[in-house]
Amino acid sequence: MKTALWTTWLSSLPVLRGSTFLEKRDGDTRVVALPIQGTRSINPARRHRLRRRGSFAAALDNEETMYFMNATIGTPPQPIRLHLDTGSSDLWVNTPSSGNCLVHTDQCELSGTYVANDSSTSQYIGSYFNISYLDGSNAEGDYVSDTVTVGSQQLDRLQFGIGYGSSSAQGILGIGYEINEVQVGRAHMEAYRNLPSRMVEEGLIQSRSYSLWLNDLYANRGSILFGGVDSGKYEGQLQTLPIQSETGIFAEFMVTLTGIELRNRTIGDKHMALAVLLDSGSSLTYLQDDMVKEIYTALGVHWTSTELVGYVPCSLAQERIDLTFNFSSPRIAVPMNELVLEIVTDKGDRPTFADGAPACLFGIAPAGHGTNVLGDTFLRSAYVVYDMDRNQVSLAQTRFNSTVTKVQGIAAAGMNGTNGVPGATLVTNPVTATSGLVGYNAAGMGPKNAGGHGVSAMGRRWVLGLSFLVSLSGW
Ligand SMILES: *[C@@H]1O[C@H](CO)[C@@H](O)[C@H](O)[C@H]1NC(C)=O
Ligand SMILES: *[C@@H]1O[C@H](CO)[C@@H](O)[C@H](O)[C@H]1NC(C)=O
Ligand SMILES: *[C@@H]1O[C@H](CO)[C@@H](O)[C@H](O)[C@H]1NC(C)=O
Ligand SMILES: *[C@@H]1O[C@H](CO)[C@@H](O)[C@H](O)[C@H]1NC(C)=O
Ligand SMILES: *[C@@H]1O[C@H](CO)[C@@H](O)[C@H](O)[C@H]1NC(C)=O
Ligand SMILES: *[C@@H]1O[C@H](CO)[C@@H](O)[C@H](O)[C@H]1NC(C)=O
Ligand SMILES: *[C@@H]1O[C@H](CO)[C@@H](O)[C@H](O)[C@H]1NC(C)=O
C-alpha cells in the first residue's frame, strides 16, 4: 500500500531545487528554504491500534496526511524523514531496535531511524527524554546531540531525543517555542536551543521565524522558509496578529479567531474571541462542538459518535462553497475541496455510503473540551509566518501552486527600521482572546483541561476509529 500512497508525491519545487536551499541575498537577507511534502490519500486501515486512555478504541494514523521534510543525522549521515510540527518543540527520531520499530519495521524504514552508536559525532546528554502527545502517542529514551543536516545546512551538536520506546513510527520535528520542550515541562530544566534557535545562533537566519506554505491538498508539496517570507506565495497583504499568551507566557501559536462564515451564515457567536492553535502537526481542524454542529448541519455532514469525525459524500468537494475564518482583520477562505479528504481502505477501495456514493472524511471535527486547533485542513489555505522573536503571526490567503518566488529575510527583533515581517501590516486593534486559552502547561503534560475526547494541543495527529467501514454501511 505504500506505493499507492507515496506515488502521488511530486518532486520538489523547481524554485527550491539543489543549491538554492540557502539563499543569500544582499545585505542581511538570510533564509533557509526547504521543500516539504504531504500525502493526499488516507488509508484508515494502515495504522496500528492504540487504545486511548479511558475513551475509545481508536487507530492512530502515524503516516498519512502529514507534512514531512528530509534531513540527515550523524556522521556518516543517517537519512531521516521528519513530520513537521508547529505544535511541539522537540525533535525526536526512532531507533531501529525500539519496540515499535521491531513490529513496524517497514514503516520505520520508510521514516528512517537513527543509531547513536553508528555516528562518530553523537554525544549522550541524558536519559530523561519523554514526550507524550495528547493523541495518545509518545516517545521516551535519551537526549543526545549530533550533526543534523537540513537542505544544505548543517547544524552541529543539535539536541534531540531518541525514542527507544515509542508508539509512532514517524520521527517529529517540533519547531515551536523552546519553553514547550519536554526538557522544560517534564524534566524542569532550562530550555535547550531547538532547530529555529540554532539556525539563528549559527547565523543562517536572523530571527526565530519561519513561513509555512503547505499548498494545495492536491499538490502534496509545499515549503518551509526559515527566517524569511516569500511574497510570491500569497494573495493580497500579509497581516500581523499578536500571539495570545497563556497566563503571560508565550508557549504556543495561539491567535484569536473572531468569526467563521459559511456562505452568508455566521457560525457560532457573533462576538467570538476564541483562541485557536495553529498546528501543522494536526491533520484536521478541531473547533468547539457547537460550532462544528452548525457546520455539519449546514453542509449535511454525517457524524459518527464512535469515531468523533464526520463523513461527507466526496462530491461535496465540487461545491463552490468557502468557509471563511476571520482573525480581527485578515480573513482566510477555505474552499470546500480542501475540507473533503479522500480515504481508501487497505484494499485500495474508496468506501461508500449505503446508497453507493463515495464517502470522504470531513476536515473539521469537534474539539470536545480541548484546545481549538486549526490544523492542515485550514492551514493549506493560508500563508502563515510564525515569528517567535516578536510573538506574532502574519496571515494571508495562500496562492495555490504558485511558482513565483520573492524571498525577503525577516530581521532580528529590535533592529532599527524594521517592524518585523517584510510586506506585512500590523492589525490595528487586534481582538484579545476571551475564551479557548487553557493556560500554559508545559509540553508533555497537555492542556490543563485535558479530559474527554479529542483533546490535544500538541503534535496532534488525527484519530480514526476502527469501526469506520462498519458504521458507514449503516447510514
Ligand atoms: C525526501 O527524500 C526522498 C528520498 O530521497 C525523496 O523521494 C523525496 O522527494 C524527498 N522529499 C523532500 C520533501 O525533499
Ligand atoms: C552503544 O555502545 C555502547 C558501548 O559499546 C554500549 O554499551 C551500548 O549498549 C550501545 N548502545 C546501544 C543502544 O546499542
Ligand atoms: C514518561 O512519562 C510518563 C507520563 O508521565 C510516565 O508514565 C512514564 O513512566 C515516563 N517514562 C519514563 C521512562 O520515565
Ligand atoms: C495545484 O496542482 C495540483 C497538481 O497539479 C492540481 O491537482 C490542483 O488542481 C492545483 N490546484 C489549483 C488550486 O490550481
Ligand atoms: C449572500 O450575500 C450576497 C451579498 O450580500 C447576496 O448577493 C446573496 O444573495 C446572499 N446569498 C444568500 C444565499 O443569502
Ligand atoms: C472580523 O472580526 C472583527 C473583530 O470582531 C470585526 O470587527 C470585523 O467586522 C469582522 N469582519 C467581517 C468581515 O466580518
Ligand atoms: C538604532 O538607532 C539608534 C540611533 O541611530 C542607535 O543609537 C541604536 O544603536 C540603533 N539600534 C540598533 C539595534 O541598531
Image: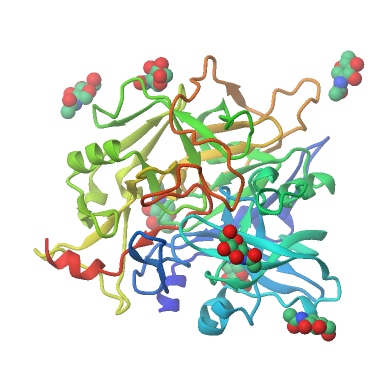
Q: Is residue 199 above or below residue 359?
A: above
- Of all residues shown, which one is farthest toward the top? 429
Q: Is residue 172 visible?
A: no
Image location of residue 407, percent across then percent down: 67, 40
Q: Is residue 98 left or right of residue 431?
A: right
| Up/down of 259 relative to 333, above or below | above
Q: Dividing the image into four equal quarters, which quarter contains ligand 6?
A: top left
* Quadrant (top left, top right, bottom left, bottom right) of the N terminus: bottom left
- Quadrant housing residue 266: top left
Residue at (56, 84) in percent of width and height: 102
Q: Residue 218, how many percent across, how many down? A: 40, 56
Q: Nearer the viewer, residue 100 or 358?
A: 100
Taking 469 as reference, is 217 left or right? Answer: right
Which one is nearer the viewer's eye here, 300 or 22? 300
Q: Is residue 369 visible?
A: yes
Measuring 48% from the left and 66% from the top, which residue is drawn there? Answer: 9
Relative to 232, residue 86 above or below: below
Relative side of 180 to 403, left or right: right
Q: Quadrant of the C terminus?
A: bottom left
